[in-house]
Amino acid sequence: MSHNLTKFSRMFEEILSRRKEGILGYNRAKLAVLMVQLMEASITAYDFPRRKTLWYTERKIEQTKELGLGIKESLEKYGYG
């Protein structure tokens, strides 16, 4: 994943640059955090199951449903590499 570091960094900068009036909204903040997690995963050994947003496609938190990237399902379907 190290070749993706530049892509994730670029997306992070783009998210931050599109904030309105100097305020980063909730959804953009979540997306920025997701990019930071992907950058971390690109440069170090990473325990994906601990990062629920990356690992699962969706999960329930109390009464709400949170969407994720679903790396678990992708690995099960396509394998690694």
Image (cartoon, helix red, strand yellow):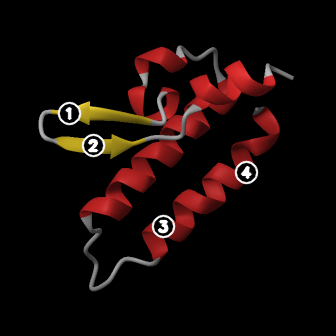
Q: What residue type is disc 1 on?
A: Ile
Q: On the picture, is 7 further left or further right than 62?
A: right
| Helix, strand or loop status at disc 2 | strand
Q: Using the numbered discs, state the Cα–Cα distance from disc 3 to disc 4 in whole angstroms.
A: 14 Å
Across and down, in percent, residue 16 comes to 44, 67
Q: Using the numbered discs, state the Cα–Cα distance from disc 1 to disc 3 in whole angstroms.
A: 25 Å
Residue 47 against residue 14 in the figure, above or below? above
Q: Quadrant of residue 61?
A: top left
Q: Residues within 10 Å of mark 1 (few under 14, many from 20)?
A: few
| Helix, strand or loop status at disc 1 | strand
Q: Look at 62% across and 53% down and name the residue there.
A: 9
Q: Residues within 10 Å of mark 4 (few under 14, many from 20)?
A: few
Q: Using the numbered discs, state the Cα–Cα distance from disc 2 to disc 4 in whole angstroms.
A: 30 Å
Q: Using the numbered discs, state the Cα–Cα distance from disc 2 to disc 1 in whole angstroms.
A: 6 Å
Q: Using the numbered discs, state the Cα–Cα distance from disc 4 to disc 1 in whole angstroms.
A: 32 Å
Q: Look at 55% across and 69% down and name the residue there.
A: 14
Q: Nearer the viewer, residue 68 or 44?
A: 68
Q: Which residue is mark 4?
A: 6
Q: Earlier in the sequence, mark 4 or mark 1?
A: 4
Q: Which residue is mark 2?
A: 65
Q: Which residue is mark 1?
A: 61
Q: Which residue is mark 3?
A: 15
